[in-house]
Image: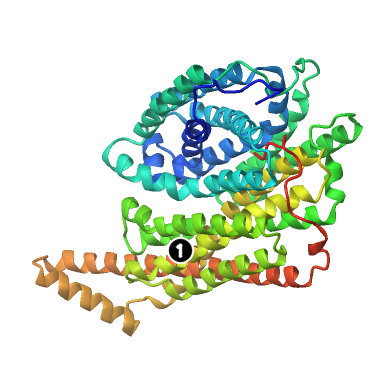
């Protein structure tokens, strides 16, 4: 209820309201990381490179993070039901545009706009949810449920869409998402009263300039980190001018925020030491989270698993995420020390990376990876929600929305940094290892000659002519080298992640101010998106 007026009609049961609120978020959550469900199928459909598909996800993420603060003005101006109908219709139109296009110059701006609409979806759904919750316990459980859904959506999306993408064109998933919006729209129009969650705030003096600068910074950051290694960083004029534009925009943005009475983002929150440490951990966590892309690449290129089997294996990671969120929620409610949440969480992530370092091989059974993937999900699930609540609790209630926005921004920066490090290791380290193998694999090398003779003999026994068997043997040797290069790249990356996690654990142990903040949500009006 808002000011004594029920948000939903009296005949709607409580369980139905909860289903409606979560169904508002789910279709857009699936669209978030949808291109990652089968990145090769998406690249083939759009006639692009995998980097372009990564960038389409970054644009969605940038639209979500960039529009968050400006969206609150529209949220206060429109009634809840009216607002929902508007952005749901827009989401249907953008999904229809994605279904009918295979051109990147159309897809990219549409994906950014979908990210903006995702921000609206999250704010409305969670505000409706939070206004119904009167106890601290209920608010923290709902907070955990939302962010649990957010971190689970990548393996969940892969699981539910892998079969569909394998059977139809990639854009069929957009068609399914298109129809999934209709039940939500009909339910809200039938069940919801036309009430306001806030006093109507006129749409004058919209700070759209800050939104433009902030979105430009985020978009260019994604462009630089995703395409930088491919274009040799600052040697390419596109990357050089993008970095220059980021630097100029940051300077203008900071100067503008400091001069404004009501800034787009309250930069004073960076004065809180606990907040700075919390967002650093969020940054580290998101880098570790997207290290799963390396594991999935290993499954596909070395073990030759198809996307459906990869999604089935990742269901163990999904189970770990769910269990981890439940455990962290229970620890928050029991007011456990934040050290006893962070330390075991990051220790589980370190264990996952160290175990996977030794599991990377040219041949392996699928069941060898079940437990490590479960442990990785468990670690991420334990860490994420308490860290975000800790960051918000470190600042004043009035600065809570800015703190939440920065937490989302650090998640985006972690995503971009992960893409940059993976691309660097994949393009640079793989070429380095490939050249090292080439130095030894010559026709006078005894090991290489034995392998070529073995492959050639196998091909001859299967009926190939002598000349073709020699070519086939050389091709099989090159494929074996490529597998070894992929394994070495994955091992190098996970070794780097292990070092980063060891440093993080040492910081957690020796950081002297961790227990000065009690982690709980103090505001019922907080929208945690």
Task: Tell me if 419 is positioned left or right of 172 in this view.
Answer: right
- Given residues 277 and 238, the one toward you in this image is 277
State whether residue 62 appears in this view: yes
Colour setup of the view: rainbow
Residue pointed to by mark 1: 373
| SS class, disc 1 | helix
State whether residue 424 appears in this view: no
Vertical relation: 477 (above or below) 81: below
Image quarter where the C terminus lies is top right
Vertical relation: 357 (above or below) 70: below
Vertical relation: 194 (above or below) 72: above
Vertical relation: 439 (above or below) 125: below
Task: Tell me if 203 is positioned left or right of 187 in this view.
Answer: right
Q: Position of residue 418 (x, y in %)?
A: 59, 54
- Given residues 354 and 505, the one toward you in this image is 505
Res 434 quadrant in image:
bottom left
Res 209 quadrant in image:
top right
- Given residues 527 and 153, the one toward you in this image is 527
Q: Tell me the crowding category of disc 1: few under 14, some 14 to 19, or many 20 or more residues within 10 angstroms, Cα based.
A: many
Instruction: Give the mark count.
Output: 1
Task: Tell me if 472 is positioned left or right of 445 in this view.
Answer: left
Task: Tell me if 313 is positioned left or right of 323 in this view.
Answer: left
Q: Position of residue 468 (x, y in %)?
A: 17, 64
Res 349 quadrant in image:
bottom right
- Residue at horizontal 43 percent and vertical 68 percent from the top: 371
Q: Position of residue 314 (x, y in %)?
A: 41, 56
């Amino acid at each position: 209820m808002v000011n004594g007026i029920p948000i939903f009609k009296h005949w709607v049961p409580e369980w139905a309201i909860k289903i409606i609120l979560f169904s508002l978020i789910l279709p857009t959550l699936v669209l978030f990381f949808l291109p990652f469900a089968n990145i090769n199928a998406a690249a083939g459909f759009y006639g692009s490179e995998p980097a372009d598909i990564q960038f389409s996800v970054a644009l969605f993420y940038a639209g979500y993070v960039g529009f968050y603060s400006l969206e609150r003005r529209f949220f206060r101006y429109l009634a809840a039901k009216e607002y929902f109908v508007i952005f749901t219709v827009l989401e249907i139109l953008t999904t229809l545009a994605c279904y009918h296009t295979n051109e990147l110059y159309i897809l990219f701006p549409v994906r950014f706009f979908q990210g903006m609409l995702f921000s609206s979806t999250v704010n409305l759904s969670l505000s409706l949810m939070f206004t119904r919750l009167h106890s601290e316990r209920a608010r923290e459980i709902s907070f955990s449920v939302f962010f649990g859904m957010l971190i689970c959506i990548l393996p969940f999306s892969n699981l539910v869409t892998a079969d569909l993408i394998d059977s139809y064109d990639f854009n069929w998933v957009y068609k399914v998402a298109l129809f999934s919006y209709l039940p939500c729209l009909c339910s809200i129009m039938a069940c919801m009263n036309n009430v306001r969650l806030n006093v109507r705030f006129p749409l004058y003096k919209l700070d759209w300039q800050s939104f433009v600068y902030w979105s430009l910074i985020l978009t260019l950051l994604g462009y630089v980190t995703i395409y930088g290694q491919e274009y040799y960083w600052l040697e390419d004029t596109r990357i050089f001018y993008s970095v220059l534009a980021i630097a100029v925009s940051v300077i203008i943005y900071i100067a503008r925020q400091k001069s404004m009475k009501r800034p787009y983002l309250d930069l004073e929150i960076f004065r809180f030491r606990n907040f700075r440490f919390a967002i650093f951990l969020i940054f580290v966590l998101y880098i570790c989270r997207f290290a799963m892309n390396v594991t999935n690449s290993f499954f596909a290129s070395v073990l030759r698993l198809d996307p459906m089997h990869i999604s089935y294996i990742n269901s163990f990671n999904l189970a770990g995420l769910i269990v981890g969120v439940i455990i962290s929620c229970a620890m928050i409610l029991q007011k456990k020390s934040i050290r006893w949440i962070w330390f075991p969480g990051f220790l589980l992530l370190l264990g996952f990376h160290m175990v996977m370092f030794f599991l990377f091989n040219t041949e392996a059974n699928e069941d060898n990876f079940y437990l490590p993937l479960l442990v990785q999900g468990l670690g991420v699930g334990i860490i994420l929600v308490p860290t975000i609540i800790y960051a918000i609790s470190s600042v004043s209630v009035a600065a809570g929305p800015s703190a939440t926005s920065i937490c989302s921004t650090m998640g985006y920066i972690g995503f971009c940094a992960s893409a940059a490090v993976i691309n660097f290791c994949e393009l640079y380290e793989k070429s380095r290892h490939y050249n090292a193998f080439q130095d030894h694999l010559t026709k006078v090398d005894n090991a290489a000659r034995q392998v070529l003779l073995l492959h050639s003999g196998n091909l001859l026994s299967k009926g190939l002519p002598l000349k073709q068997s020699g070519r086939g043997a050389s091709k099989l040797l090159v494929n074996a080298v490529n597998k070894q290069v992929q394994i070495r790249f994955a091992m190098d990356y996970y070794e780097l992640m292990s070092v980063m996690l060891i440093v993080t654990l040492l910081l957690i142990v020796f950081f002297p101010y961790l227990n000065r903040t009690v982690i709980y949500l103090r505001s019922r009006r907080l929208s945690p998106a």
